[in-house]
Image: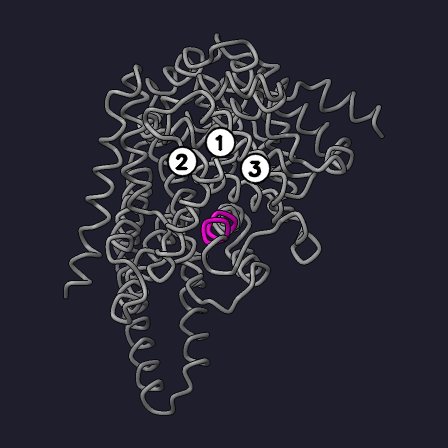
Amino acid sequence: MPAETDSIRELIKLWMASSWAAAFFGLSQIAKLLGNGNSEWTKDALEMVTRSIESELSEEMRMVFQSGDRLQRGLITSMFNLLAGRVDTSRLIAKNVVDLAQCASGTAAMLSPVNEQQLAWQELQNKLETFNLFAHVDLDLDLLRKDASLSEFVARASRLGPYRSVWAIEGVGHFFAELGDTSGRSIKLATEPDTLPSSSLVALHSGAGLSFARRCLETITTRHSEREVRTTLERFIVICNENSHAGYVGAAYEALGLVARNLYPHLLLEIDHHLAALDEELVAYFWHGVGRGVYFAPTNFLLDRKTLRHVMKQAQQESPHELARLNVFSGLIWALVLVNIRHPKIIEGFIADNLDGLDGEIFAGALCSAAAIWRESSPEDKALTAFWKYHPSDHRVAEFWNAYVTEPSRMMLNHYYPAVRNAGLGWLFRHRSLPELFVDRERCE
Amino acid sequence: MRRLFTQMFQRPINAIASSLALIGQTSSSRQLIDGMVSRFVYALVKIEREEDGKTRNKVNIQTRNEL
């Protein structure tokens, strides 16, 4: 007992000492900053101390710390931008609300006992993080500066880390495409691939596609004619073809489904009907995007156990035919895997809840496509390898995981990835069966 | 002050109008809720540059005319 008391006493002393040291360090840096104005040195020293403390935290604590850190940095940036009259106030408020929600869901995940509720909060935090990076990339990277080029912003987004950079680059693609006609900074991905890193092309095309789709669909009036929808879709295809690299155009086509599902749901069946008349391949891309849209739909934002089971039924109900069903499921699984690539436990929970109704072949095809996209977009990320080597605790899920996650991923990443990559990767933005991914590639090679 | 007031309220008002516009257009209640919330959020986070507003409108009109 005395030994225990001694150790507690020592711990309290050390804790007090570290708090005192941190406060004193902060004061000394402020004094230096006021004294000699060498802000660069001070900035680096403060950053080093912050990162050093961060490295001592557990993974869950670190994610919450990072969210909180980004929240306070965002608030300060917002305040300065606002004072300078550079940004829209209500947009800044929206960003800060999402930052706060992200921080709160991370805290809830950390404080919840280890069960499905914790996974649901963690999944929500991941989803909010990706959405926030995509929607507010201009505020995060200061894209309001007019002089920088697309490649400079891609380089800046790439420094955000292996996970965050992918979503930020998608946001950069969307941002540049949104401003394309108005600011003189247009996105011409068909001619620019040489100036851009190859790892950014998938995300840029996907982001730009969302802008093309939104801008085309918003021209359809409430009392539209069949011809109006048909012409709009033709125009969308022309814009995609003109502005995309041929190998990645599939990523731009697919975005139509996501935008239609969440912003123009009343047009889904009409678009399907017209695309079928134009090209059957486009129907597949479209419904894959709808699947992604179902995953990001507001009513599915907090995916607890009940919602996880429901989302599969919903995917089934929203598919008017077999090609749509294959692609909606594929798009849904694809988005789930990519958003939660750092947390295989979330995918384990999804499989456990849907084991009886889950089609292993569709799951494996979607997973392999997602794995190839992630390898291309974030080649340094170790999370992908950790993901497919993960061992679920439930033995039924473990069997499924081994057959439809570990083995196909190993085949894709260790053997077929170079051949799949040579075909341009845009073709992965729709359902592909394992034979299409592996056997056909081998034949092509 | 007037600019700040416009900045604070124009987007939320547009967001409400945009989401309400979907009522009566879709038969599925889940899709309707998703559509309304997505439109609301989209209108709040939409990228728009004030100085480019006039040009943007011109481009939209051009696109419509082309159609």
Counting from the top left corner in percent of width and height, residue A77 is at: 32, 65
What's the CA distance linking mark 3 and mark 2? 18 Å
Counting from the top left corner in percent of width and height, residue A148 is at: 52, 66
> Callout 2, which amino acid?
Thr
Counting from the top left corner in percent of width and height, residue A327 is at: 55, 19
Label 1: how many residues lie within 10 Å, few (<14), some (14-19) or many (20+)?
many
**A164 or A265, which is in the foreground?**
A265
- Inspect the magenta stretch and tell me whether residue A158 lies in it: no
A132 versus A83 height, above or below: above
Label 3: how many residues lie within 10 Å, few (<14), some (14-19) or many (20+)?
many
Q: What is the quadrant of residue A235 in the picture?
A: top right
Q: Chain of mark 1?
A: A
Residue found 21% across the figure and 38% down from its top: B16
Q: Which mark is residue A232?
A: 1
Residue contact at pointers 2 and 1, CB within 8 angstroms: yes
**A309 or B34, which is in the foreground?**
B34
What range is drawn magenta here? A173-180
Q: Chain of mark 2?
A: A
Residue at mark 2: A219
Total marks drawn? 3
> Callout 1, which amino acid?
Thr
Residue at mark 3: A252
